[in-house]
Image: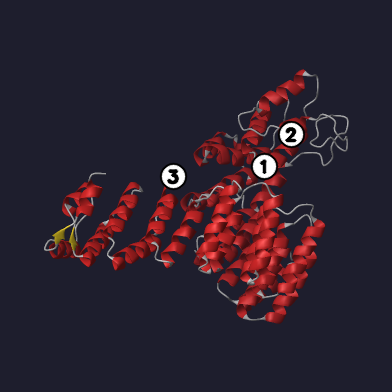
Amino acid sequence: MLVRFIRRSIAASRHFSAQAAAEKVSRTGAPARNNPGSGGGIGGGGGGGRDTLGKRLLSLVYPKRSAVIAIRKWKEEGRTVRKYELNRVVRELRKLKRYKHALEVCEWMTLQKDTKLQAGDYAVHLDLISKVRGINSAEKFFEDLPDRMKDLFTCSALLHNYVQNNLFAKAEALMGKMSECGLLKNPLPYNHMLSLYISNSQLEKVPGVIEELMKNTSPDIVTYNLWLTVCASQNDVESAEKVLLELKKAKLELDWVTNSTLTNLYIKSGFTEKAASTLKEMEKMASRKNRVAYSSLLSLHTNMGDKEGVHRIWKKMKSRFRKMNDAEYSCMISSLLKLKELKEAENLYTEWESVSGTGDVRVSNLLLAAYVNRDQMEMADKFYDRMVQKGISPCYTTWELLTWGYLKQKQMGKVLEYFEKAVTSVKKWDHDEKLVREVFKMIEEQGDVEGAEELLGILRNAGYVNTGLYNSLLRTYAKAGKMPLLVEERMEKDHVQLDQETRKLIKITSKMCVSEVSSTFLKQ
């Protein structure tokens, strides 16, 4: 729970730092208004359904379609292409996560001799290269930039990508170079480093970063929000309130993230009145512009056990927004389940099912998890069938939930069926040692040698075989009073070492009757 809160807090802070900064620098040198006579705006500047370059570029839904061809065609029609209008299109495409087309627009602009690009434009270009082609290509792009363009904007963009990829050494080295070049007169690079250390639980490095920041520049609201996140992760109310006092002395305006972090800390620490006060202030700050704040309000009211508050916020959201998105439905369904309002959660899921159309399995998994956690496997089965009938594709989590559910029921046939589906549903299985251990434990207790061999086969195909697994197999044979065949040869083939327990178990089982099961699996 705490880890999830820290991640949410950092994500919210990044919304006001990395992303906001990228949006800001992409506007560097761009006029603040749209020229209604140019015909190149995104929405036509109030021109209704008229044709614009922005509309054409945003209509390129499929990645294989070319933004460059669309721009060329626009010019061939004798129309004007203006840089600030293309910058607006790039911002919109980035918001929609249409990074390939956004990158194509940026690359087209770099080839135009009459287009004067600024460092902010290159910063956005670099970030898009990293997203589309990877960090190595972004580094090459940065190296090839003219020295005059290697300023705060482009360096911060590269630093942001190092942070996103948890490249500690490169991030720290870049900070050193930025310091040498006098580019650390802005809190943004420090905020990136704070995010890196906090998200990787290296909290001991945070005070040093803040101290250096204070020497070179002034913290912004994002800095203080990240600092408060650290206090919240340590349940340190006293330190958080000292940070809050410093924030107020700096005459910075608190935002919804500040109040969200404080509210969460007060709830965990039992300061109910303070939590209610900061939550009230946070609600005043929620608006259409920072829509994500409403989901945070739902979660915080849920953590306070305030059912009335949860329903009131949801009603407020539905009155303000034409349509709820999947994340908001997920948040509300999760809140209802935590408040033990299963029936209302089921009704809301039915509503989502009828209006969403995305088939996002993550929403479905919330309700499936609720049935599994309540040991209602009959309901879980029916709900799974409903998901499939509605065209919702199960994912690893779906199969994993069903595996755990049937494990509680000791239905090993179902367990192995769903476990195999889980493992084979992903390209590379990040093995869950706890799940494997519990499945093998149940198989051992039942002396199910056929199940043990089947499980070992599934794990072998997933590239996960070790001495402990073979020992579990041997213990299962010992429990069943059976002797497995060619265990040492099989371990050698799997490049698995024997240990003392392995040899002991082989010796014990060698005195038992030969099992036909292992020979059956050997032929497969």
Q: Amino acid at mark 3?
A: Lys
Q: Position of residue 163 (x, y in %)?
A: 54, 52
First along the sequence among labels 1 and 2: 2
The residue carrying mark 3 is 427
Q: Is residue 32 above or below residue 195?
A: above
Q: Are marks 1 and 2 in contact (CB under 8 Å)?
A: no
The residue carrying mark 1 is 94
Q: Position of residue 341 (x, y in %)?
A: 65, 70
User: Which of these two is toward me, 458 or 464?
Assistant: 458
Q: Is residue 510 above or below residue 358?
A: below
First along the sequence among labels 3 and 1: 1
Q: Amino acid at mark 2?
A: Leu
Callout 1: SS: helix
Q: Quadrant of the N terminus?
A: bottom right
The residue carrying mark 2 is 86
Callout 3: SS: loop
Q: Are marks 3 and 1 in contact (CB under 8 Å)?
A: no
Q: Amino acid at mark 1?
A: Arg
Q: Position of residue 337 (x, y in %)?
A: 62, 67
The residues bearing labels 3 and 1 have C-alpha atoms spaced at a distance of: 27 Å
